[in-house]
Amino acid sequence: MLHAKILVVDRTKVFVGSLNIDGRSERYNTEIGMSIDSAEIAGELLDMLDFGNSSYRLRLTQDHEGVEWVSGAEDSLAVFTQEPEADRWTRFKAHVLGRLLPEDWL
Protein backbone atom coordinates (compact mmCIF):
# COMPACT_ATOMS: atom_id res chain seq x y z
CA MET A 1 0.00 0.00 0.00
CA LEU A 2 1.33 3.44 -0.88
CA HIS A 3 1.28 6.25 1.60
CA ALA A 4 2.44 9.83 1.54
CA LYS A 5 4.57 11.81 3.92
CA ILE A 6 3.04 15.23 4.51
CA LEU A 7 4.83 18.02 6.32
CA VAL A 8 3.31 21.42 7.00
CA VAL A 9 5.84 23.94 8.30
CA ASP A 10 4.70 27.10 10.07
CA ARG A 11 1.36 26.89 8.25
CA THR A 12 3.07 28.41 5.19
CA LYS A 13 5.02 25.60 3.48
CA VAL A 14 4.01 22.05 2.51
CA PHE A 15 6.00 18.98 1.51
CA VAL A 16 4.10 16.00 0.06
CA GLY A 17 5.93 12.94 -1.17
CA SER A 18 6.97 9.36 -0.70
CA LEU A 19 10.38 10.21 0.73
CA ASN A 20 11.13 9.20 4.30
CA ILE A 21 12.62 12.30 5.89
CA ASP A 22 16.13 11.00 6.56
CA GLY A 23 19.49 11.11 4.83
CA ARG A 24 19.60 7.41 3.92
CA SER A 25 16.30 7.58 2.04
CA GLU A 26 17.32 10.82 0.38
CA ARG A 27 20.57 9.30 -0.91
CA TYR A 28 19.75 5.67 -1.64
CA ASN A 29 16.02 5.35 -2.36
CA THR A 30 14.18 6.36 -5.49
CA GLU A 31 11.58 8.72 -4.12
CA ILE A 32 9.62 11.74 -5.23
CA GLY A 33 8.22 14.76 -3.46
CA MET A 34 6.89 18.22 -3.98
CA SER A 35 7.54 21.36 -1.96
CA ILE A 36 4.84 24.04 -2.02
CA ASP A 37 5.30 27.54 -0.61
CA SER A 38 1.68 28.58 -0.03
CA ALA A 39 -0.07 29.49 3.22
CA GLU A 40 -3.43 28.98 1.50
CA ILE A 41 -2.66 25.40 0.45
CA ALA A 42 -1.09 24.66 3.85
CA GLY A 43 -4.27 25.84 5.58
CA GLU A 44 -6.54 23.81 3.31
CA LEU A 45 -4.40 20.71 3.85
CA LEU A 46 -4.50 21.12 7.62
CA ASP A 47 -8.29 21.45 7.46
CA MET A 48 -8.50 18.15 5.52
CA LEU A 49 -6.24 16.10 7.80
CA ASP A 50 -7.84 14.00 10.52
CA PHE A 51 -5.46 14.59 13.41
CA GLY A 52 -7.75 12.75 15.80
CA ASN A 53 -7.44 9.35 14.19
CA SER A 54 -4.53 9.11 11.82
CA SER A 55 -1.73 11.53 12.52
CA TYR A 56 0.09 13.64 15.08
CA ARG A 57 1.26 17.22 15.18
CA LEU A 58 4.70 17.80 16.64
CA ARG A 59 5.57 20.77 18.79
CA LEU A 60 8.37 21.80 21.11
CA THR A 61 7.85 21.51 24.83
CA GLN A 62 7.47 24.77 26.74
CA ASP A 63 11.16 24.68 27.73
CA HIS A 64 12.14 24.01 24.07
CA GLU A 65 14.18 20.99 25.19
CA GLY A 66 11.92 18.21 23.91
CA VAL A 67 9.15 17.26 21.51
CA GLU A 68 5.46 16.59 22.13
CA TRP A 69 3.12 14.58 19.89
CA VAL A 70 -0.38 16.08 19.82
CA SER A 71 -3.54 14.45 18.48
CA GLY A 72 -7.21 15.27 18.56
CA ALA A 73 -9.25 18.39 18.09
CA GLU A 74 -8.58 21.58 20.05
CA ASP A 75 -11.36 20.74 22.54
CA SER A 76 -9.96 17.26 23.29
CA LEU A 77 -6.20 17.26 22.77
CA ALA A 78 -4.07 14.27 23.74
CA VAL A 79 -0.43 15.23 24.35
CA PHE A 80 2.35 12.61 24.51
CA THR A 81 5.93 13.17 25.66
CA GLN A 82 7.10 9.84 24.19
CA GLU A 83 6.40 8.66 20.68
CA PRO A 84 2.85 7.29 20.66
CA GLU A 85 2.22 3.81 19.31
CA ALA A 86 5.83 2.82 20.07
CA ASP A 87 6.21 0.23 22.79
CA ARG A 88 9.23 -0.02 25.13
CA TRP A 89 11.01 -2.50 22.85
CA THR A 90 10.66 -0.20 19.83
CA ARG A 91 11.88 2.81 21.84
CA PHE A 92 14.83 0.75 23.14
CA LYS A 93 15.84 -0.30 19.61
CA ALA A 94 15.55 3.30 18.40
CA HIS A 95 17.73 4.44 21.29
CA VAL A 96 20.43 1.83 20.58
CA LEU A 97 20.38 2.38 16.81
CA GLY A 98 20.44 6.11 17.41
CA ARG A 99 23.84 5.67 19.03
CA LEU A 100 25.21 3.39 16.30
CA LEU A 101 23.95 4.84 13.02
CA PRO A 102 24.94 8.15 11.46
CA GLU A 103 22.45 10.86 12.40
CA ASP A 104 21.35 11.47 8.81
CA TRP A 105 20.25 7.79 8.56
CA LEU A 106 17.74 8.19 11.39
Image: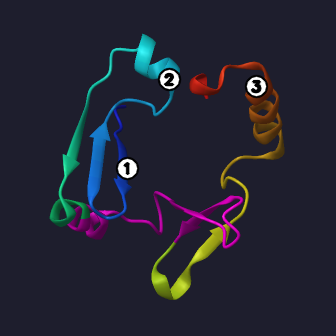
Which of disc 3 and disc 1 is earlier in sequence? 1
What secondary structure is found at the residue carrying circle 3?
A: helix
Q: Which mark is residue 23?
A: 2
Q: Tell me the amino acid under the disc marked 1.
A: Leu
Q: Tell me the amino acid under the disc marked 2.
A: Gly
Give the residue drawn at x 37%, y 31%: 1
- Above or below: residue 40 compared with residue 28: below
Q: Residues within 10 Å of mark 3 (few under 14, many from 20)?
A: some
Q: Which mark is residue 97?
A: 3
Q: Tell me the amino acid under the disc marked 3.
A: Leu
What percent of the width, then of the height, locates residue 68?
64, 63
Question: As drawn, which residue projects farthest toward the bottom?
Answer: 75
Q: Which residues are magenta?
A: 43-71
Tell us which disc is closer to us: 1 or 2: 2
Q: Dots 3 and 2: beta carbons under 8 Å?
A: no
Left or right: 83 in relation to 12: right
Q: Residues within 10 Å of mark 2 (few under 14, many from 20)?
A: some
Residue 82 magenta-highlighted: no
Q: Which residue in the structure is indicated by mark 1?
A: 7
Give the residue drawn at x 46%, y 79%: 73
Give the residue drawn at x 50%, y 74%: 72
